[in-house]
Amino acid sequence: MKKADKNRVIVFDTTLRDGEQSPGASLTHREKLEIARHLALLNVDVIEAGFPVSSQGDFQAVYDIAQSVKGPVIAGLARCVKADIDRCAEAVAPATKPRIHLFLATSAIHRQYKLKKARNEIRKLAVEFIQYATKLCPDIEFSPEDASRTEPDFLAEIVEAAIDAGARTINIPDTVGYSVPDEFGAVIARLYESVPNIDQATISVHCHNDLGLAVANSLAAVRNGARAVECTINGLGERAGNAALEEIVMILRTRPDQYGGLTTGIKTERLYRTSHLVSRLTGMGVQRNKAIVGANAFAHESGVHQDGILKQRETYEIMTPQDIGADGTELVLGKHSGRHAFANHLSKMGIRLKPEELDNAYKRFIELADKKKFIYDDDLLMLAQEQMIETAPVYTLEYFHVSTGSKTVPTATVRIRKGEAIMQDAACGDGPVDAVLKTIERIVGTEGRLIDYSLQAVTVGKDAMGEVSMRVAFGNNTISSKAASTDIVSASAKAYISCVNRHLRETAQNKLSRRPKKTT
């Protein structure tokens, strides 16, 4: 590691790879590109864009991100398998700064039950495939999977071998979130003591949050010499998720006294905006009491606290909303705003729409402005998201009517378009939303099980947009979606139809990928 790098922590974002593995957090190709662009604006150092060999869709997303997103290193994940490495090298090739991230399990439990290989075999595989990867890409990262549960002597041995083989970033993962801070910090400290060539590589960490310690473990590693942290926006990821990028960054920024003045290159004023974008596109809501970016992070209800804030803000705030770009929701546009002002404001928000999409979004903006007195950034983000559909939806909502009351059986009539065909039906339910969803099920003939439903206001005021987030299980396939409207029943119907459309699209893509290739 260069001397100049020792005071800077590299931020490696894996929202698009590990983050998308959150149950139900499926992203379309277009949404992945949009998030990647915002991560670049946030100034992350590395974007892990996907696992190219896993599917054609993942490969294409990594390839297109590598081709179009400039600034960060663009990394793809690969197992220590030749086909994985070849596919990954091809996917990241267009990047100005490409990286192949190799991983191979090293812990005793993984060696015995998953890989069925001895220590010397694991070491040989790691060296062989790192050396192979260096011929295809100049920047190689290696992760000994389940490192925190790997015997210390073997972990040191394989790290030394990986560096000798050409890996210039060594990532030490707490794969199952088993470690605690003192223990994980000691793992990093021990490597610096026992690996003679460790100064030739950057030591990174990737901590999972199964015990709620991902951020604490990551910072313990930083305190003991790690200079890169792998994390995700909002802490998304497998099972309980990963270390939250916004928490890592703001802890280092707020408490430099505890971390030797270490800094990151993150533009913190973009954290709040990026968090909300990722939440909306993944359909994974941010809890109100979430640190840094939650709705309550800068809210003060206690009279004592309010009094203190009014007299001196620092009495109860250790950072300000402005630090993360959450300095109040500004009124931006009204119904008399023109198309040029609308397009200009979207551009300032970092949102890119094609001319036809911009026209459609502007029409929706005018419709919304007739219903709402004020239009806010979050309203505009919702309108832009509606245009980020890669293919025409199978079903679209044409019309609905609900009848409900304290002494009335809730009933819904719904009309849906499929191509040129118009289908209509009616059903009763336990409330207006349930009646609408049951009617949609009757029409599309696809039964889903609603496993999560939440509603929150997108902006402020009585005319605020209501945003519905839901997760729906179609057999073994769980889909998340969001939709917003000034009418919560309408938002619920749109979100459910979006889930149906995503399910049908994914089912079709899976069938296509399983179709045998023609041979000559």
Image: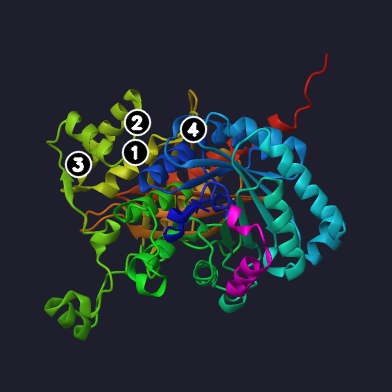
Label 4: which residue? 96
Q: Which residue is mark 2?
A: 353
Q: Is residue 426 visible?
A: no
Residue drawn at x 35%, y 55% is 271
**Which residue is under mark 3?**
369
Asked if marks 3 and 2 touch (Cβ < 8 Å), the reply is no
**Label 2 Cα crowd, 10 Å radius (few <14 / some 14-19 / many 20+):** some
Which of the marked residues, 3 or 2, is nearer the chain's N terminus?
2
Q: Earlier in the sequence, mark 2 or mark 4?
A: 4
Quadrant of the rendered structure where residue 83 is? top right
Question: Which colour assignment does the render follow?
Answer: rainbow
Q: Is residue 187 magenta?
A: yes
Residue in the image at 40% along x and 70% along y: 260
- Residue type marked 1: Ala
Front residue of this view, candidates 200 and 114? 200
Query: Can you tell which of label 1 and label 2 is closer to the viewer?
Result: 2
User: Of circles 3 and 1, which is in front?
Assistant: 1
Left or right: residue 333 versus residue 204 is left
10 Å neighbourhood of mark 3: few (<14), some, or many (≥20)? some
Task: Indicate which disc, 1 or 4, sits on the residue closer to the N terminus.
Answer: 4
Magenta residue span = 184-201
Residue drawn at x 12%, y 79% as measured from the top left: 311
Please report contact status of discs 1 and 2: CB closer than 8 Å, yes or no: yes
**Residue position marked by numbered label 1 in the rendering:** 384
Residue 295 placement (x, y as % from top left)? 32, 65
Which type of secondary structure does the marked residue at label 4 adopt?
A: loop
**For numbered disc 2, what is the local secondary structure?**
loop
Of the residues tagged 2 and 4, which is closer to the observer?
A: 4
> Can residue 123 be seen by looking at this rendering?
yes
Marks 2 and 4 sit apart, C-alpha to C-alpha, by 24 Å
